[in-house]
Amino acid sequence: MTKTVVFDISNLSQTIRKPALYDMARIGYARVSTCEQTLDLQTDALKAANCDRIFTDKGISAIAKSRPGFKKALSSLRHGDSLVLWKMDRAFRSLRHALDILDHFERDGIDFMVLTEGIDTTTPMGRCFFQIRNAFGELERNLISERTVAGLAAARKRGVKLGRPCALTPKQILDARRRKSAGEDMSVIAEHHRVNVRTLYRAVNGC
């Protein structure tokens, strides 16, 4: 008597990736914050990682929302491809931004590699999200640092004086300069205004 065997394949799509319709590609992305910086270190590493194409952004800070190169890199990715970075903070603006992009990658079957942080989701261990959680902390610290530098640079361009406020008022500075021009000893002037001599020199020479 012939038996009929029925296989339940309803759940196979959840465990087996769909085959790519073309050769899987490695897409590299590199970014530097200023036009004075060079991309060579990152692009050399991406080439060594056998990237098929490399997209770049130069002079684009960590806080910039518009990144043409990164946008092109993302739009070129297909199921089975990999995005390859030299470091996580080259691509992501914030932790939330990173998580959103990685969620998108997981849904669309796109792999993710970070060369300096040992992340590679093409490997069994690399697919475990727990393995890359420590990298997110470093990403956030690096982005905060870069935002701070960018903010200070922007403030300087606006003419904002950075550092501690002057210990003397403009009237006191004028008085100190007048006394100094009259030949009065700086230690005496400093004692009069109740500041140390070093502070007085800074004020007189342009606080």
Image (cartoon, rainbow, N blue to C red):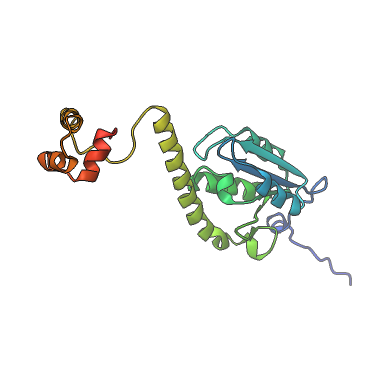
> On the image, which quarter does residue 78 sit in?
top right
Instruction: Name the residue: 28% across, 41% down.
Output: 164
Q: Give the side of residue 52 with respect to residue 31, left or right.
A: right
> On the image, which quarter does residue 162 sit in?
top left
Q: Quadrant of the N terminus?
A: bottom right
Residue 165: in sight, yes or no? no
Instruction: Name the residue: 15% across, 36% down.
Output: 184
For the residue pair 48 and 22, the one nearer the viewer reads as: 48
Q: Quadrant of the C terminus?
A: top left
- Image spot of residue 49 (x, y percent): 74, 54
Q: Hey, which residue is sitting farthest right in the picture?
A: 1
- Image spot of residue 6 (x, y percent): 79, 63
> On the image, which quarter does residue 180 sit in?
top left
For the residue pair 109 and 143, the one nearer the viewer reads as: 143
The correct choice, above or below, for 39 with respect to 12 in the image is: above
The correct choice, above or below, for 31 with respect to 174 in the image is: below
Q: Give the side of residue 1 with respect to residue 7, left or right.
A: right
- Image spot of residue 90 (x, y percent): 58, 45
Instruction: Name the residue: 61% across, 45% down.
Output: 104
Instruction: Name the residue: 49% across, 38% down.
Output: 63
Q: Hey, which residue is sitting farthest front in the picture?
A: 183
For the residue pair 111 and 54, the one nearer the viewer reads as: 54
Q: Give the side of residue 11 with respect to residue 188, left or right.
A: right
Q: Give the side of residue 1 with respect to residue 58, left or right.
A: right
